[in-house]
Structures are given as C-alpha cells and as structure tokens.
Image: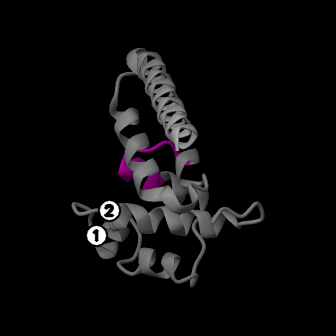
Amino acid sequence: MSNKNKKSSDILRDNLIALLNKEDAVSMRQLSLRIGASDSYVQKLLTDQTSPSLQRVDAISDFFGLDTWILLCDYADSAAESLEILQLINRLPRSIRPHVLEYMKFLLKQNEDIQETLTGAKNIRKKKR
C-alpha cells in the first residue's frame, strides 16, 4: 500500500528487495562486494542497520542498470514488475524511447476500449434478463 510519508530508506529497501528477489538476481553478498562495500553491507541496508550514502545508491543503481531516481520511487505493490519494465526501457537507446512511450499509450487505450466493450456487453445482458 502506498504511503505519502514513506521514508526514502524504506522505498529503497523495498525496491532493492524486489530486485534481489528476481530469479536471476545476485546475492546480497555479491551485490555488496560489486559496489565496493563490505560483504554484509546490503544485508545491513535491508535490516535498517545502516543507511546508504548517495554514492552507494548511485552504485546500486548503476549495478542494476537503472537511473538513481528509479530506486527512490515508491511502486507500492508492483515494485518487481515496475522495476523490471524500467530496467528494460533503460537498456533501449534513447532515440527509440519516445516510440516505446507511444506504444504503451496505445496499449493502454486498447485496454480501455476492451474494458468499455466488456462493460457494455454486461449491461446489455443485464437488460435482457
């Protein structure tokens, strides 16, 4: 559940957990060492025993191929899916990202149209009864 007053450390922790819970994810220890920290650094982050510096947040973002701001956004209950989508988009050349955006808008419009059609069909069935 989204919370307006959620702390940045909580948001970062939730997003980091989502990234580490992916099937092909590295371990907490591997990530810690890859970003130049002690082997238990990520574990301490996830258990609120330490707070990351901005440099560490940048290093974690770089490791996962994300812009730093993405790790600090609250995706509520869909963090894993949202982060995966953003990771994939970040891997695309910037020149085609506007096309991806337009395609996503197209998909949303298609979904809205389908929902309207289904709602209309349900209303017709109810009237026939």
Q: Is residue 66 magenta?
A: yes
Horizontal and vertical percent position of residue 9: 63, 68
Residue at the image point whose x is 57% and y is 67% from the top: 52
Determine the main secondary structure of the stretch shown in magenta.
Answer: helix
The answer to whether residue 31 is magenta is: no
Q: Which residues are magenta?
A: 59-68
Q: Is residue 22 above or below residue 67?
A: below
From the viewer's perspective, is residue 31 above or below residue 60?
below
- Contact between labelled residues 1 and 2, with CB atoms less than 8 Å apart: yes
- Secondary structure type for disc 2: helix
- Extreme-left residue of the structure: 24
* Residue found 36% across the figure and 22% down from its top: 93
CA–CA distance in space, label 2 to label 1: 6 Å
Give 104 or 127, whichever is nearer the viewer: 127
Residue closest to the far front: 129
The residue closer to the viewer here, 2 or 96, is 2
The residue to which callout 1 is attached is 30
Q: Nearer the viewer, residue 126 or 31?
A: 126
Tell me residue 100's x, y (percent): 41, 22
Closer to us: 101 or 53: 101
Residue under label 2: 34
For label 1, the SS is helix
**Is 51 left or right of 60, judged from the image as shown?**
right
Is the residue marked by circle 1 packed among few (<14), some (14-19), or many (20+) residues within 10 Å? Answer: some
Q: Residue at coordinates 62% horizontally, 70% vertically from top-left?
A: 10
Amino acid under disc 1: Gln
* Picture colour scheme: one colour
